[in-house]
Amino acid sequence: MARIDPVIIVGCGPVGGIGALALNRHGIPVIVLERLESPVEDQRAASIQPAAVELLAELGLADIITRLGVVAPIYHFWDRVEGTRVAAFDHGVLRDDTRFPYVVQYEQFKLVRLAMAAIDGATPAAFRFAAPVADVSQAADHVTVKIDGPNGPETIRGSFVIGCDGARSSVRKAAGIAFEGFTYPQRFIKIGTTFDFFSTGAGYATRNFFFDPDEWLNLFRVGGYGPPGIWRIVVPTRVDEPPEEALAPDSVERRLQKFFPKAGGYPVSYTALYDVHQRVAETFNRGRILLAGDAAHVNNPIGGQGMNSGLADIVNLADKLADILAERADITVLDRYTRQRRKAQVEFVQQNTVNNKRMLEAQDPATRQGYFDQLRRTAEDPLLARQFLRRASLIDSMEAAAAVA
Ligand SMILES: Cc1cc2nc3c(=O)[nH]c(=O)nc-3n(C[C@H](O)[C@H](O)[C@H](O)COP(=O)(O)OP(=O)(O)OC[C@H]3O[C@@H](n4cnc5c(N)ncnc54)[C@H](O)[C@@H]3O)c2cc1C
């Protein structure tokens, strides 16, 4: 490949980190600019869906995440009001669709570290921390990125810039790209505890979704910092609940006790509060300025789809940039990137996650019962279960995107 300006990635979250590795595998020089001083220990995403494990396999990371993470072939839906299990889904029905018929629970910050460690030094790759990007601009054959770091302003040049800088993306704003959609009125609170919910005898799986008209709930186990791991609960706050009240230790304890009453307090590892949005950028490419991951789309976390979809963006984009830089394709192939990944977002991830929330919080008893009956029927019929899990695992969305011309 002829000497080329590096591709500049803004943001070293999971999408930026995996993007750097994917470009590195193509022999493309890359510079990652991250505003924080070191890789953040972000405790958001943990569920890596089968379709994303396939992508990570291409980058040589599937074995290690499967070994180090928590492998979860089965997940449950529960009726929180009655305390009964509604349905159990087994990804085993996907054995003809994927080499990885399971979800891997592996926290996103660990994935970033793996990606950085897997970079091949034969191609230049730089990760620069404390490098907040203030502006980006472009000319016909290059981009210019302005960093406003602790040592003062600096400008660097690249062939393309990819905004992997999250929901509030500076790159998206600099390019004037609209971020269409809505924000939910309530926030979601996440609570991590080392209390082992397997020990309760309630029969929980590694991943559990609870229906409740008052307070739906997700319960997941992640590896944490070693055995026994950490169980995470995600619940909505009241619409009028101030953040300091939601995060106060006694209200966190109350929420845990309300879910599963037990003697003694819960050991709490971490808590966090999130605003929740459903938004998709009007385009993911404007000339040489590109968007991937949360910079391009955001959704509620029920069902674990946001990061997975971002990983699908960045692997797709790295392939196309490799074709452009090797002169196998011209820049218009980036319009196809937007068409493919917007379709995956709008017709799959946005719909899936909006429906997941609507289902878990359903108020009307007949509607709730309808969901229960449908989930039971689906889980018990291997053909229906396969259809359902292909969509939940993002296999359908990836295949639909690949078919877009
Ligand atoms: C509670 C919760 C649970 C979730 N669980 C899952 C799950 O199980 N599975 C799933 O697929 N998704 C899940 N998600 C969504 C997932 O966390 C996000 O989709 C994912 O973090 C997006 O990755 P990203 O790299 O695009 O952006 P981010 O992770 O937001 O990373 C952006 C990076 O850019 C940096 N940055 C920002 N601005 C600048 C700037 N101007 N200059 C330089 N750097 C900048 C930030 O510091 C950050 O490091 C969950 C979300 C929440 C809230």
Image (tube, rainbow, N blue to C red):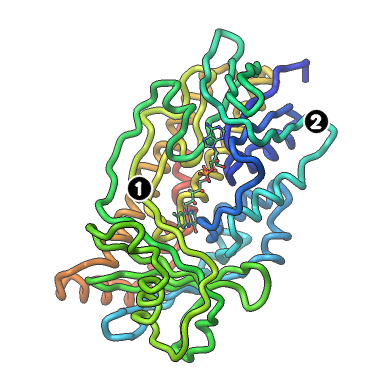
Q: Nearer the viewer, residue 163 or 283?
A: 163
Q: Classify residue 296 as left or right of residue 55.
A: left
Give percent across and percent down for residue 172.
Answer: 44, 28
Q: Nearer the viewer, residue 200 or 311?
A: 200
Q: Earlier in the sequence, mark 1 or mark 2?
A: 2
Q: Where is residue 254, by image quadrant?
A: bottom left
Question: How crowded is the residue under tag 1: few (<14 C-alpha within 10 Å), some, or many (20+)?
Answer: many
Question: How crowded is the residue under tag 2: few (<14 C-alpha within 10 Å), some, or many (20+)?
Answer: some
How much space separates mark 1 and mark 2, taking CA atoms? 37 Å
Picture residue at 75% right of the left edge, 32% below the top? 125
Q: Classify residue 290 as left or right of residue 31.
A: left
Disc 1: residue Cβ within 8 A of ligand 1's nearest atom: no
Picture residue at 46% right of the left edge, 49% below the top? 306
What's the amino acid at mark 2?
Thr
Which residue is identified by label 2? 123
Disc 2: residue Cβ within 8 A of ligand 1's nearest atom: no
When the figure is inspected, residue 377 is found, relative to residue 242, above or below; the finding is below
When the figure is inspected, residue 291 is found, relative to residue 154, above or below; the finding is below
Name the element at disc 1.
Answer: helix
Q: Nearer the viewer, residue 241 or 175?
A: 241
When the figure is inspected, residue 259 is found, relative to residue 297, above or below; the finding is below
Quarter the N terminus occupies: top right
Q: Residue furthest right?
A: 122
What's the amino acid at mark 1?
Gln
Which residue is identified by label 1? 350
Name the element at disc 2.
Answer: loop
Picture residue at 53% right of the left edge, 80% below the top? 195
- Regarding residue 186, the answer to whether it shows in the image is yes
Give percent across and percent down for residue 137.
Answer: 52, 15
